[in-house]
Image (cartoon, coloured by chain):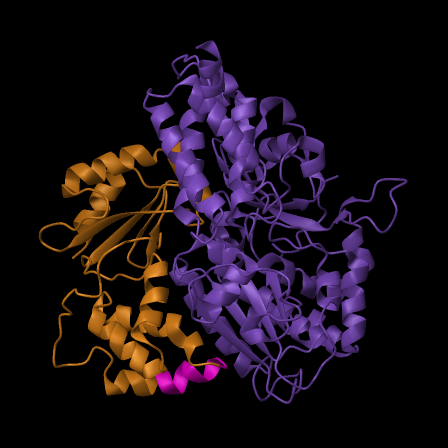
Amino acid sequence: MALAEPVLCKRIPTAPWGDPTDRKLVTYEQFVATGGYEGLKKARALEPKAVIEVIKASELRGRGGAGFPAGVKWGFLPPEDGKRRYLTVNADESEPGTFKDHMLLDYDPHLLLEGIAICMHACRLDTAYIYIRGEYHLQAQKLINAVKEAYANGIFGPTSLLGQINGRDPACVVHRGAGAYICGEETGLLESLEGKRGWPRIKPPFPAVAGAFGRPTIINNVETLAICGPIMDKGAEWFKTMGKGRAAGVPATVPASFGPKLFGISGHVNRPGVYEENLGIKISELVNTYGGGIRGGKKLKAIVPGGISMGVLSADQYDTELDFDIGRKAACLGLGTAGVIIMDEDTDMVPVARNIARFFAHESCGQCTPCREGTGWMYKMLTRIEAGDGTTRDLDLLLELSGSMGAMPGTTICGLADGANWAIRTILNKFWGDFEKRVRKERYVSLQVASAAK
Amino acid sequence: MAWIMKNSATAPVARRAEPYLDEATKALLEADVIPRYPTRRASTLPVLHAVQDRHGWLPTQAIEEIADFLGLKASEVLDTASFYEMYWLQPKGKYLIMVCESISCELMGHEKLMEKLHHKLGVEVGETTKDGKFTLMHAECLGACDTAPCALINETLHEHLTPDNIDALLDKLP
């Protein structure tokens, strides 16, 4: 069933409710006039713990990629000790295929600020840092202006309706990154916020215990916080009427897929863009209803379900439902950021794999050897295969590498290597023919066999 | 990204009498940026951005001045600055063209765009035109996959690019 009315896109004209060409920046006045900051007022009337309970009851799961239940994350914080605690907002959106936060920041920054204020109240956090990627120049400026409006209207600062938190006036700071995908990893982001290179930290300790500047810190994605305002305004039950919900017979302890979600469609479709729909929509429905079908009436070849690190699906998985269970159902890493990339029948998968390997090789931070070396060598091998100089041994080695790099827990600190190996492995496995016809056949004689033959 | 090897220990440092981080900028940063963070080191990224915005790039002398200003060692600031793509440790052109080369842009014709730019500017990726006007760079996903192919020219994102419209776009730049 399609979404009855837009939630995140309430003020941003989006098909089928509005014309995307009518999009304009929503000012503070317009935001308030259309029911904005009502959720914050309702949250403010509640005890902080009760707010966390509402988010927990809504079963909101993080929209940044991992899908961790937001209310549970908020509940991890240790008891207050009167010292500083932080919120960091992950607006370092840089996964290829993902551009949902771009739209929210471009047109409705107050929706994010409302969620930030709610989270600061609920978790008793005195300072919020919005880590926005360096390439989003215009969006950072819009966000800075919106934060100024929020300060002037008593959302943050000395006149904040939140009152003092940890003995300080609630503050909201826009912190610009400088072009590093790895800073979207939560502890890489914290290192970068502290003014260092964005090398992810070894966990534990988890950020909820010792995060930014060694203090308890909550890290949430833009979209996760943006949905908190509407949830507080209309209630957890309302939120749970949307999305796929929990299948019959599944115990309530298993996280399910509730609520609306922003889906980005790009690649070979007629109407690429960001669309809001229920979690659990089929890829085919999303592409045909919203994306206007595949460009030129061509046939489908491959689908990236949620940003390239989630892997690639083949055409026979076109009817897969986009929800948090997609990883188990379709043998990919997960829903990720729900940035769907469509590739038509004319696409050659060798350059696609080469492009994806290049991305990870370029963005690997260089801290852990399997990732630094593995992504680099995958890129080199795929470049060679694309140039026609590859052999069947390269393919075997590529498969072995993409099946082992980062797959063993504890060999790399963060999930970048895992994302790289899922992407390359799924492409190789599903489109083996594309690769095989590009390489020379080479018999491989191992040293063991050679020495036995003497 | 962070593995550019060079012998920086014996490399001569170009110096000038006029500081890159002048007193007025320092006062501005001290009032506006430093209080936002609990440590001075956390201001490294915003201070680097501020200095680069004024001078176009970050000479070694500027790195040293920033280190003094933040109470850090120059190597610590360099460590941070060299990690991030957006900080320039060598001069760049007046206009920095960052063409997105990630998957959606490649599917939508990034290659033709690059051919056109190579031909028009006569430079390879990473090089600056002789007149110092344009520097051509690749970028990873710029977050505009729905309007691919796209490119960032200085701070402005240009979408739905074609070899023709990027030609006209560059000709219009003063």
**Magenta stretch bounds:** B29-38
> Which residue is pictured at 76% across the width and 68% down the height?
A52
Residue A23 visible (yes or no): no
Chain letter, purple? A
> Which residue is pictured at 26% across the width and 76% down the height?
B64
Q: Is residue B45 magenta?
A: no
Query: Residue lying furthest right in this view?
Result: A249
Query: Picture coordinates of residue A290 (x, y %)?
Result: 58, 37
Q: Is residue B34 magenta?
A: yes
Asked if residue A340 lies left or right of residue B11, the reply is right
Quarter-of-image position of residue B95: bottom left
Query: Residue lying furthest front in this view?
Result: A454
Residue B36 visible (yes or no): yes
Prevailing secondary structure of the magenta residues: helix
Query: Picture coordinates of residue B171 (x, y %)?
Result: 17, 48
> Which residue is pictured at 35% across the width and 65% down the height?
B79
Nearest the eye: A205 or A285: A205
Q: Is residue B68 above or below residue A29?
A: below
Q: Is residue A394 above or below residue A376?
A: above
Q: Colour of chain B?
A: orange
